[in-house]
Amino acid sequence: MLENIIFSLNIVMPLVLLAAVGWLARRAGLVSDAFLAGGNKVIFYLAIPATLFRSIYSADLSEVFDPAFIAFVAIWTIVSFGAIWAIAYFTLRKRHPSAISAYVNGAHRGNLAMLGLPILFMIMSDEAAKVAMAAAIIIPIYNIQTIILLTIHSDDADKKLNIGKLLIGIIKNPPIIGIIIGLSAAIAGVGLPSVASQTIDGLASLTVPLALLCLGGAMTFKGFDAKFRFAVSASLVKVAVLPIITIALAWLLGFRGNDLTMLMILHGVPTAVGSYVMIVEFGGDSYIAGTNVMLTTVLSAFTLSLFIFVFRAFGIII
């Protein structure tokens, strides 16, 4: 148990400390509002697309093809999102409609590229291709879901959903563009010159540190008000409720062993840092989104350790 906790803390705590550095830098006057705004744009338009391109382009998805697993991952990602959205909508629409998008995004969208994949690669390196394939399915769905959610619930959204505008927004969304280009290049077998590869790697390497510095710089604590309670609720759904339901459903459908471990981590990692950036760009509630990212990042160190311990105790992790 202690080994698992230390393992998770070694992965998660540097992220917390980076955000703390951003918070301290903002209070010391080293980081301005203009820097935070510009930093979020760099992450959204350059760093995240580069990260997604690199993840998709470099993965050998042809090694493993499991139709049942792929179908479950895709369908459950869509269904669980719809369920969380429906609950949040009917619970918050009258008194706190502006909180819906941040709540749903925070309770559902996981940090696969930065945490999920590294953890899975370390635990089960022999399943690397299958892990990459699962991420290649979930990440585009996450981004499309987020765009739809924020288009409907952003402050300046039209009262009636404009399908044409929504489709254009999806196509023009930088993370989606990064995924499409990465898939196209991988399928076509395009080789990148060293200069291009190193440039993309450099941009991708900005994502985590810059996003966390900006997140920490923008963090404020407004007390234990309704918004903070929403962030706590969404965080518990993300790191505890969602993975438990996912595991139970997958078990009932016949999945066992490493498949259960992959599903647990894919759905139990903390909320994606990039989701905070997208909330900011689309005019969502940045306080709930930022608080949610921080809470899930800290909590997941313990919840993932507990899940891994239980899985090992019952012989689920092979």
Image: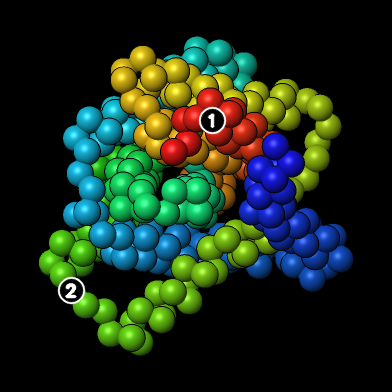
Task: Label 2, secondary structure: give it.
Answer: loop
Q: On the image, which quarter does residue 230 sit in?
A: top right
Q: Quadrant of the C terminus?
A: top left
Seen at 44% across and 74% down, the residue is: 201
**How far across and how far down the image is residue 7, in percent?**
66, 50
- Can residue 253 be seen by looking at this rendering? yes
Looking at the rendered structure, the secondary structure element under dot 1 is: helix
Closer-to-camera residue (186/44): 186
Check disc 1 and report the residue beneath it.
Answer: 311
Q: Give the crowd class for mark 2: few <14, some 14-19, many >=20 residues within 10 Å.
A: few
**Residue at the image point whose x is 50% and y is 48% from the top:** 123
Q: Quadrant of residue 2?
A: top right
Question: Quick check: can you spot residue 217?
Answer: no
Question: As rendered, which of 172 and 196 lies closer to the eye?
Answer: 196
Answer left or right for 19 relative to 29.
Answer: left
Contact, mark 2 vs mark 1 (Cβ under 8 Å): no
Give amino acid for label 1: Phe
168 horizontally vs 42: left or right: left
Point out residue 113 in the picture as x, y percentages from the top left corner.
46, 53
As shown in the figure, which amino acid type bears the numbered disc 2? Val
Kindly identify which numbered label has been placed on residue 190. 2
Q: Where 254 falls versus 294 (above or below)? A: above
* Quarter of the rendering occupied by the N terminus: top right
User: Is 243 rendered above or below residue 194?
Assistant: above
View extreme (right): residue: 28
Foreground disc of the pair 2, 1: 1
Q: Residue at x 64, y 53 (%)?
A: 11
**3D distance between C-alphas at marks 2 and 1:** 40 Å
Q: Residues within 10 Å of mark 1 (few under 14, many from 20)?
A: some
- Residue 190, placed above or below residue 80: below
Q: Residue at x 21, y 64 (%)?
A: 186
| 24 and 257: which is toward the camera | 257
